[in-house]
Image: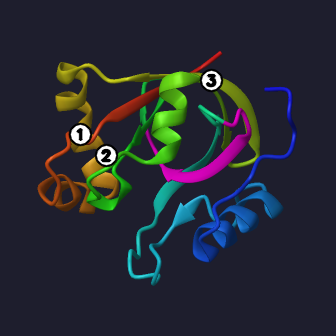
Amino acid sequence: MTETTPSDSPMDWIADHTRRYLDSDGTDGHLWHGIDGSFTQGAPTLLLTTRGRRSGKLRRTPLIYGRDGNDYIIVASKAGFPEHPLWYLNLLTHPEVELQVGAERFPAKARVAEPAEKARLWPTMTALWPDYDAYQSSTDRDIPIVLLERI
C-alpha cells in the first residue's frame, strides 16, 4: 500500500476508538468493551486498512478479531444490517490489506472462509462477541468470516 494516511470512520465513536488505538499502539483500544462499556471482558480488536474498490483510497476500520493458527479472523457482520460492510466489499476487490494488532503493523492477504471453515470458526468468534449470533438472526444475508494471512 503506497499511501500512508488512511481515512477513518466518519462515526465519532469509531474514529475515537481508532485514534486511541493508534496513539497508544493498541494499549488503549486493543480490548474493546462495547459502545457503552458494558462488555466487561473486552473483545480483542485490530485495525484493518483496505483500499477502496472504486476510489482507490485507503480506509481504516477497527474490528474484533480471533485467531486460527497464524491467521487472524474477522466477521463482516455490520451489526446484522442487510448489506455487507464497505470494508468487506473493498477487500473482495483488493485482498491485500494492512493490519495493526497492538503495536505491530504488517501486510496481510484476505480471503473469505469456505462454508466448512465458517462452520468451524463461527463458535470461536461468538465466544469473543456473542452478539454475532443475534446479528446473523436479524438478517437474511449470510454473514461472512474473513481470514487474514500475514504476508
Kind of residue at disc 2: Met
Dot 1 lies on which element? Answer: helix
> How far is disc 3 from disc 1 in space, using C-alphas?
21 Å
Check the image and report above or below for 137 versus 53. Answer: below
Q: Which mark is residue 131?
A: none
Left or right? Give the position of 88 relative to 49.
Answer: left
Kind of residue at disc 3: Ala
Q: Residues within 10 Å of mark 1 (few under 14, many from 20)?
A: some
Q: Earlier in the sequence, mark 3 or mark 1?
A: 3
Q: Earlier in the sequence, mark 3 or mark 2?
A: 3
- Residue at 17 percent across and 61 percent down: it is 134
Kind of residue at disc 1: Trp
Q: Which mark is residue 122?
A: 1
Where is the C terminus found, in terms of image quarters? top right
Left or right? Give the position of 138 relative to 28.
Answer: left
In this figure, which residue is indicated by the disc labeled 3? 108
Magenta stretch?
55-66
Where is the N terminus found, in terms of image quarters? top right
Which quarter of the figure has residue 12? bottom right
Check the image and report above or below for 25 versus 32. Answer: above
Left or right? Give the position of 15 relative to 122.
Answer: right
Is the residue under label 1 in contact with that under label 2 (CB below 8 Å)?
Answer: yes
> How far is disc 2 from disc 1 in space, using C-alphas?
5 Å
| Residue 147 lies in the magenta-colored region | no
In this figure, which residue is indicated by the disc labeled 2? 125
Q: Position of residue 71 (x, y in %)?
A: 48, 25
Dot 3 lies on which element? Answer: strand
